[in-house]
Image: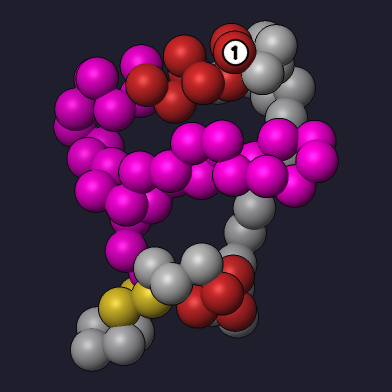
Amino acid sequence: MGTLPYPLLSDWHKQTVKDYFVFNEKGGTAIRSVFVVNKDGIITYLNTTFKADKREDYEAVFHELEKLNVH
């Protein structure tokens, strides 16, 4: 994938998934989700049904990143 021009988040302690309400209490895991947060800390894109095998889900994220001028 190479170097990314934007940061990614790792959430080992599961605090962020709880803060963003995408924590599956029963399974103890995160619900696969994508959040795009702009430089002002505003969520500009949200998908809590992201499917890793659906190309259109990736395309929607990339489209949002392009709108934010992130390449």
Picture colour scheme: secondary structure
Relative horizontal placement of residue 11, taking residue 57 as reference (left or right): right
Other residues around mark 1 within 10 Å, as few (<14) / some (14–19) / many (≥20): few
Task: Give coordinates of residue 26: x percent, y percent.
Answer: 23, 89
Task: Give coordinates of residue 47: x percent, y percent.
Answer: 35, 43
Quarter-of-image position of residue 51? top left
Q: Foreground: 66 or 51?
A: 66
Q: Is residue 8 visible?
A: no
Residue drawn at x 29%, y 28% is 57
Q: Foreground: 64 or 25?
A: 64
Q: Amino acid at mark 1?
A: Lys
Residue 59's place in the image compared with 26, above or below, is above
Name the image quarter holding the C terminus.
top right
**Residue farthest to the bottom, as pictured:** 26
Q: Is residue 71 magenta?
A: no
Residue 27's place in the image compared with 70, above or below, is below
Residue annotated with mark 1 = 67
Residue drawn at x 24%, y 83% is 27
Residue drawn at x 24%, y 20% is 55
Please report the bounds of the magenta region as a residue range. 30-59
Name the image quarter holding the N terminus.
top right
Relative horizontal placement of residue 1, taking residue 51 as reference (left or right): right
Task: Give coordinates of residue 10: x percent, y percent.
Answer: 62, 59
Relative horizontal placement of residue 27, taking residue 41 as reference (left or right): left
Quarter-of-image position of residue 15? bottom right
Dot 1: element: helix
Residue 37's place in the image compared with 26, above or below, is above
Q: Is residue 5 visible?
A: yes
**Residue farthest to the right, as pictured:** 40
Q: Is residue 57 magenta?
A: yes
Q: Foreground: 30 or 66?
A: 66
